[in-house]
Image (tube, helix red, strand yellow):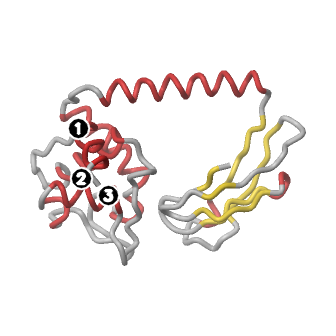
């Protein structure tokens, strides 16, 4: 198992298969086990991680090799589709739609659903990061911001999702910067570091 987190430290725990590993933002931890029988194995977060601690079920589906291979082939196909998208110049509406989904699932919990901010993180609506130089915005999302709760997402998101969420943040909530970041721009930024 490869275990990480996108917000705070969690403890990924599935007692019936004897696995417990800390999930830390910006790090990927590794754990292993041997599962003898196919089935569904359930666990929970074992770290008091915040207000939603009690709503973090973990489900491990142990399947046959054939079923796993079919799942893996599907994931490879999805990855190939993302690679193909990365080679294209995507229109603003496509990046905004994808960016809104990424933001809602990974950013809104700290920065607020409408970019208004929270006790954990500053707002993005009208902020210097979302209305300043795009390179600074890209650096903050890819590398994180030391000394703050802003984790590095450069290794957690693919280039397409990074480009989409930054485009979304720069063009939402009245920011209206008109900036359009393509996946290749993110890939080039990462190579140049």
Q: Gap in Å between the C-alphas at discs 3 and 1?
A: 15 Å
Of the residues tagged 1 and 2, which is closer to the observer? Answer: 1
| Circle number at residue 182 | 1
Q: Which residue is labeled 3 in the image?
A: 141
Q: Is residue 23 left or right of residue 133?
A: right
Q: Residue at x 55, y 72 (%)?
A: 50
Q: Residue 11 in the image: x percent, y percent?
A: 66, 65
- Which quarter of the picture shows residue 43? bottom right
The quadrant in which the C terminus is found is: bottom left
Q: Residue 9 in the image: x percent, y percent?
A: 57, 68
Q: Earlier in the sequence, mark 3 or mark 2?
A: 3
Q: Secondary structure at mark 1?
A: loop
Q: Residues within 10 Å of mark 1 (few under 14, many from 20)?
A: many
Q: Residue at x 77, y 57 (%)?
A: 19
Q: Nearer the viewer, residue 15 or 144?
A: 144
Q: Residue at x 84, y 45 (%)?
A: 34
Q: Is residue 46 left or right of residue 26?
A: right
Q: Residues within 10 Å of mark 3 (few under 14, many from 20)?
A: some
Q: Gap in Å between the C-alphas at discs 3 and 2?
A: 11 Å
Q: Earlier in the sequence, mark 3 or mark 1?
A: 3
Q: Residues within 10 Å of mark 2 (few under 14, many from 20)?
A: many
Q: Residue 38 in the image: x percent, y percent?
A: 84, 35
Q: Nearer the viewer, residue 113 or 34?
A: 34
Q: Which residue is labeled 2 in the image?
A: 169
Q: Is residue 60 left or right of residue 34?
A: left
Vertical comparison of 134 with 185: above or below: below
- Which quarter of the picture shows residue 122? bottom left
Q: Is residue 105 left or right of residue 4?
A: left
Q: Secondary structure at mark 3?
A: helix
| Circle number at residue 18 | none
């Amino acid at each position: 198992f490869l275990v990480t987190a996108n917000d705070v430290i969690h403890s990924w725990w599935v007692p019936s298969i004897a696995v417990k590993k800390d999930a830390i933002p910006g790090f990927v931890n590794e754990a292993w086990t041997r599962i003898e029988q196919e089935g569904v194995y359930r666990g929970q977060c074992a770290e008091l991680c915040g207000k939603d601690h009690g709503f973090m079920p973990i489900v491990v589906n142990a399947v046959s090799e054939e079923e796993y291979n079919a799942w893996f082939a599907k994931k490879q196909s999805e990855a190939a589709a993302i690679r193909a998208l990365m080679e294209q110049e995507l229109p603003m509406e496509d990046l905004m739609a994808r960016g809104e989904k990424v933001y809602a699932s990974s950013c809104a919990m700290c920065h607020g659903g409408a970019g208004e901010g929270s006790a954990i993180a500053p707002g993005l609506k009208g902020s210097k990061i979302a209305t300043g130089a795009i390179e600074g915005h890209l650096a903050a999302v890819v590398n994180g911001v030391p000394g703050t709760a802003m984790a590095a997402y450069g290794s957690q998101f693919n280039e397409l999702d990074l480009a989409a969420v930054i485009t979304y943040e720069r063009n939402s909530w009245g920011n209206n910067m008109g900036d359009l970041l393509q996946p290749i721009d993110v890939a080039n930024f990462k190579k140049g570091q």
